[in-house]
Amino acid sequence: MQQLEAKLKEPAEGKTSFVDYPPRANAELLRLIAVVPPKGSEHLPIPVCAEQNNKVLGTWNITAKGDVLPAAWSGSMVSAAPNSSACKDFIMASRAEITRLAQSNQPAQPPPVSEQPTPPMKQAASAAGSPAL
């Protein structure tokens, strides 16, 4: 696991890179695949996908602060072939997004905030009918 952490902290010069841990894993082993932004784009989150037995177990983003947050993914959750990665679609989509953001030098966008306004607080009325303070 220390090898994985070390690779995540070493962005490649000028290109997006992948970290696949453990290397040469078979389908039965838990496998983690991450997309590491290029050097200079360390502010972007690191997308991570976990797979086992040709199924995606989960997707996350590691923020620049080190927080691990769930990553929304509605794409394929199983591998297309027995010898293919179940995380392939997630990783390719994440790589394209990181490349786009790195080239435009845009900061990562925070998660969307609910558009619904917070309802006003109701004041309890006293026995005389005026609001209690």
Image (tube, rainbow, N blue to C red):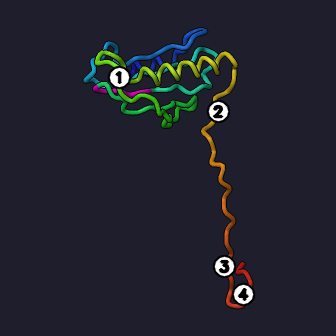
Pointer 1 residue: 79
Earlier-in-chain disc, 3 versus 4: 3
Q: CA distance from mark 3 to mark 2?
A: 40 Å
Secondary structure under badge 1?
A: loop
Pointer 2 residue: 109
Pointer 3 residue: 124
Q: Quadrant of residue 110?
A: top right
Residue farthest front in this picture: 80
Label 3 Cα crowd, 10 Å radius (few <14 / some 14-19 / many 20+): few
Earlier-in-chain disc, 2 versus 1: 1
- 85 inside magenta stretch: no
Earlier-in-chain disc, 1 versus 4: 1
Secondary structure under badge 4?
A: loop
Earlier-in-chain disc, 2 versus 4: 2
- Picture disc at residue 129: 4
Q: CA distance from mark 3 to mark 4?
A: 9 Å
**Which span is picked out in magenta?**
49-53
Q: CA distance from mark 2 to mark 4?
A: 48 Å
Q: CA distance from mark 2 to mark 1?
A: 29 Å
Amino acid carrying label 2: it is: Gln
Earlier-in-chain disc, 1 versus 3: 1
